[in-house]
Image (spheres, coloured by chain):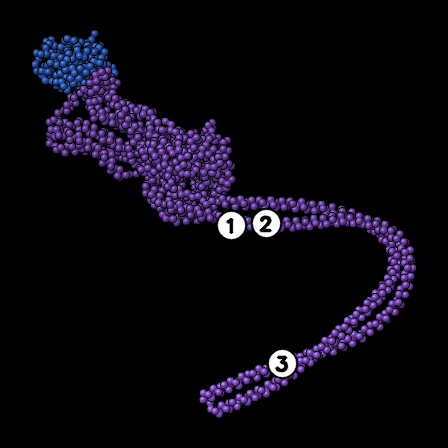
Chain colours: A purple, B blue
Amino acid sequence: MAIFAIIALGVGFFAGLKVTRPGITASVEEYLEKYSFYDYRLLSTLGFEQEDVDFLAAGEDVEAAEGAVSFDVLYRLEDGSQGAVKTYSLPQRLNTLKLVWGRMPEAEGECAADSNLFGKSDLGGRIWLSEDNKEEDLEHFSCREYEIVGIVQSPLYLQYERGNTSLGTGRLDGYLYLTEDGYDVDYFTDIYVKFSGDFGLYSAEYEAFIEGKNGIWEDLTEEAAGRRYNSIRDTAEEELAEAREELEEKRTEGEEELEEAQKTLAEAEKELAEGEEALADAEDELAEGERTLEKERRQLEDARAQLEGKEQELADAEAAIAENEAKLRDADSLLAGKESELAEGEALMAQKEAELVQGEAGLAEAKDAWQDSSREIEAGKLQLAEGQEQILAGRAELARQREELTFAYGAGLIGQEAYDAGLAAIAAGEAEIDAQETILREKEQELLQGEAALTAAWQQISEDEQLLTEGRQALEQGKEELAQGRGALEDAKADVSAGWQELNEGKAELAEGRAAFEDGRREIAKGEEALADAARDMDEAKATLEEKEEELAEAKKEYTDGLEEYQDARKEFDGKIADAEKELADAEEELAELKEPDTYVLGRDANMGYVCFENDSKIVEGIANIFPVFFFLVAALVCITTMNRMVEEQRTQIGVLKALGYGEITIMSKYLTYSGLAAVTGCIFGFFLGTWGFPEVIWYCYGMMYSADPIFYVFDWRLAAISIVVSLLCSMGATWFSCRVELVQVAAALMRPKAPKAGKRVILERITFLWKRLSFLHKVSMRNIFRYKRRLFMMVVGISGCTALLVTGFGVKDSIADIAAKQFGEIQTCDISISLKERADGSLEEKLLALGSEGMGEYTCVMEKNMDLVTEEGVKSVILVAGKEEEMASFLDLHTAAGKDIAYPGPGEAVISNKIAEDYHLRPGNQITLRAEDMRTITVRVSGVYENYLYNYVHVSEETWREQMKEEPERKTVYLNLEAEKEDLLTAHGLSAELMKLDEVLNVTVNEDTMERIGNMMASLDIIVVVVILCAAGLAFIVLYNLTNINITERIREIATIKVLGFYKKETAAYVFRENILLTILGITAGLVLGHFLHAFVMGEIRIDMISFDIYVKPVSYVYSSLLTLAFAGTVNWFMSGKLEGISMTESLKSVD
Amino acid sequence: MSAFVSFRNVKKVYKTGEVEITALHDVDFEVEKGEFCVIVGASGAGKTTILNILGGMDTLTSGSVFLDGQEISSYGRRQLTSYRRYDVGFVFQFYNLVQNLTALENVELAAQICREPLDAATVLEQVGLKERSNNFPAQLSGGEQQRVAIARALAKNPKLLLCDEPTGALDYRTGKAVLKLLQDTCRNMGKTVIVITHNQALTAMADRIITVKSGTVADTILNEHIVDISEIEW
């Protein structure tokens, strides 16, 4: 029975715990599979289009891709309560919903709501989108109120945690699912992708698979988002262009109209001005006219006076003219005499001139004749010279001929005859030449005569020429005199003519004067008349002018009105245009601001529920790895003890059997069968109970946090086999061992009762002074305790195991539950941390300061940067924090695990978190190298190791960064504290929401939220603790019960005896259980120590990256563990005391069997 | 005043399932204070049941039992325990010593729960085991063990000493010595001693002999000729 129980328990725990993780994981996997949980969630800041979805759906390994719309919105319920929810579009294929109650929404005004937030009674209720929502947020929705028609569970929210938002208090209360018509957007905010590969949940293969996909999908997403970006931009640009065109058109139109109006106005103005001018002119004219009239009147008077003077003058002039006429007639007759004289002189002169001309002509003839003669002589001379030359030449020829002839003759060339003939010819030639010479001489003579005659002739000519020249001079003189005479005559004549002319002119003038006089008289009369007319006209004109002035004033008024109208119209037009332009500019700006979309490829590990579940199930696994081993150990021990006792009890029987001739194997097989059967039944019972019960219980507990389908039973053959084999080994091994011991003895020895184990003094007795102090009964107990070493050992092991389990269970809780509180309460003491999009600058600081009224206290900007810690033992990703020493104090408390403060690192120094120090064996004084993603490194000396639980940090000062990296640190993180008196969660959330509204802010983390979230997550540890307590209780019961039972059975006579001796019930119990209690206390003491180490070991096993557990057990946990163990022991003792009671005293009378 | 010990119409029925076995019926006897009484009978006659009832280890079905004027048969469990504790001393056939305690300690074990115990060492000395007082039972012979058991019973200074086949596991000589001790105790210390045995021979040494047969008292004889144990042979 004991074997059955312990095996059942051991196997139950082992198999149960072992199977729990696969079981719950499989259930969750099934759940996720059933509702098609995504593999990738793709996000783009600009959203996606159906086209993109199709594009991505065509990717490799993709089973399905689906676009989804999701927005956060503030809601209001009927009872006025408000909050923020995340809304989703109804999924078609991926992340489908589990309908808890009601039906799925179909119309645009219907929704399905989070089963965590709403219950069945909310069906048919209404949910309003709060008026506090920003208009731009509300625009995403087509309705303002939705009817809840269904209550659903979404696989996106495995866990109860709903996440954060930038709205309202910053926390999401739940989710709503709307139909696509429920949204008023034409794009998808998310795309969910599911791959066709079938991998185990949280399996390494899955991670590797996704890892392999990441790069590709980042590109794909980028591409899809890029397309969307382009399409948006193109559309916008087109629209913008159209709008601009329209604007231009309108502007032109308007301006034209306006211009026309303006022109009209200008004309009117001009006309008006002209009118005015004309009027002014007219007035001027009128004035002038008046003046002129006056002047004329005066002139007329003057003229009349003059006219009377002129009449006298005229009469005088007529008398003078008559006198002058007489004088002129005398002069005329004188002049006629002089003229005839002059005519005679002139006729003489003409005669003389003709004679002169004759003489000059004869001279010219003579000169020509001479000229000719002279030329003839010259020619003759030339001929002469020629002739002489010819003669000379003839003679030379002749001489040559003679010579030749002579020579020829001399040489005998020619004969005498030829020679003679030749001589004759030459002589003839000479004769001829001589004749010619004579002629020439004659001609020369003649020529000389001709020349002399010529010279005489020339002399004659020269004389004649002189005479002629003298004659010419005299003639010229006479002519001049004549001309002078003629001139004088002419002058006189002209004088007389002039006189006449003058006279005639005077006469004419006089006549004119007389006429003018008459005219003047008439004119004056006329002028007077005209003057009268003019005066009359003037009066008329004046009247007209007045009329015109009136008209002009009217026109002016009209004009002013027109102008006003025009200005108004202009203003309106300008305004409208400006508005339109502004709108356009805004749109343009918007377009310009339209950045290339940021895309995110989020795997399942970005889903809170998914990740939390993994961590939680890992904890279960960690525990499953440790505890069952422990249980098996105890189970083995219990088996050994039990079987040992059984065999001992039955030794007589064994002896009899042996004596009867049964073989050892037969005998042994009897016991082996017994123990084997017990083991197998126990194993089967335990296995099924364990594998069914544990996952069920744990799942039930998890169910409070996780929404998933009921767990289903997982049967693990391997596990079953292991369980069976181990349990059989334990029980049968123990049996075999015990049997061996007995069976080696001979049958006779076996049949004799085994001598009771001799009493022995215990070592304690040697320490007399102590021993003496013990009361008698205690001495008995002490001796009993040490009597059975194996039992002592088992008891201590069992009890210490129980205590250790409890310590571990509580310790796990202590270690994990407090890390968030410690991390954010004692180490990172800032209330809020903000991630920025860009590095912090002055404008942000101003904005932050402006939020002071929201409860914001101090803040500091730091750089948080992921870097690789490069050590000999490997590379580790850490977060480097570079801050300003003077500002960090209120945000970060650096201290060692022992609580000693650590100074903020100075230049070239770093303070590192304890986990990396442990993992890489770093101590203060070591040099560490950190590597940025661009492979630049920074080397610093570790100046301290500080206590830290979440993430791995390396703190350095900004100076260090500046010095080593030669650049300003990128301060993209802000640590922020609330004002001391406003430090509560509400303020924090309010502030967080305000902060989220800042453009620069990427993300706001309220540390208290994180703390709470982790705290909530850690609440799951309570389950673990409960499980552990159950385990421990089971262990304690079985061990204690088994041992006490053995103890009682073995000592039944003794107990009966003391009962007979008159020990009261209590005393009897005390007599027996004192040992138990002592052993329990001993076990607890050992267990506390063991628990301390076991806890450390378990914590080591469930090591989660990024989290350094505070391996620490609260003192109160030790107390709890001890008390619980005592309680278990007490329960067992209480239970067993009943059995003690049942021992009949008559037993004491029986013999030893 | 009635007798020190008296049984009146004592009936004891054991029930085992449907079967009722009447172990005792109509048992009537009396024992006077200071008597050495031997209850003798064949195996299964019911003598042990009588002892059990008298020793407060078992209850009876009907009738009544008085010891020193107190009706034991009306006692509850706790009263019975007190009764055993203060009024009765037992000597078992198989000594029933606590193996883990020395001779002296065994005696002390009994002595320390009594109101007026005798000094354990003295008692041991009286039974002649002074030298062996620090030995464990396993180191003692049967007779010695039985003597320790007697010493244990005596140390309680009980009104009544009950002995269940005290010599049953002993050889003749040792048994005699033990019986001598008992007889001496009775005589010297004035204790009432009741010895149960199947050995008829022992009746000779008793003051009163009660013969039990088939669950009832067949005969009660007051022995006029008391023989010292050393003279008895069997």
Instruction: Give the residue number, with chain letter if any, for mark 3.
Output: A381
Please report whichever mark, 1 or 2, sits nearer to the chain's N-terminal start.
1
**Residue A250: which disc?**
2
Identify the amino acid type marked 2: Lys
* Callouts 3 and 2 in the same chain: yes
Q: Position of residue A628 (x, y in %)?
A: 27, 33
Is the residue A327 above or below the residue A1066 in the image? below
Nearest-to-viewer mark from 1 and 3: 3
Residue at screen point 37% across, 44% down: A214
Identify the amino acid type marked 3: Lys
Q: Position of residue B141 (x, y in %)?
A: 12, 18
Answer with left or right where residue B41 lies relative to residue B114.
Answer: left
Is the residue A78 above or below the residue A468 in the image? above
Please report whichever mark, 3 or 2, sits nearer to the chain's N-terminal start.
2
Question: Under tag 2, what secondary structure?
Answer: helix
Question: Under tag 1, what secondary structure?
Answer: helix
Q: Position of residue A133 (x, y in %)?
A: 50, 37
**Residue B126: which disc?**
none
Answer with left or right where residue A382 lies relative to residue A299.
Answer: left
**Residue A238: which disc?**
1
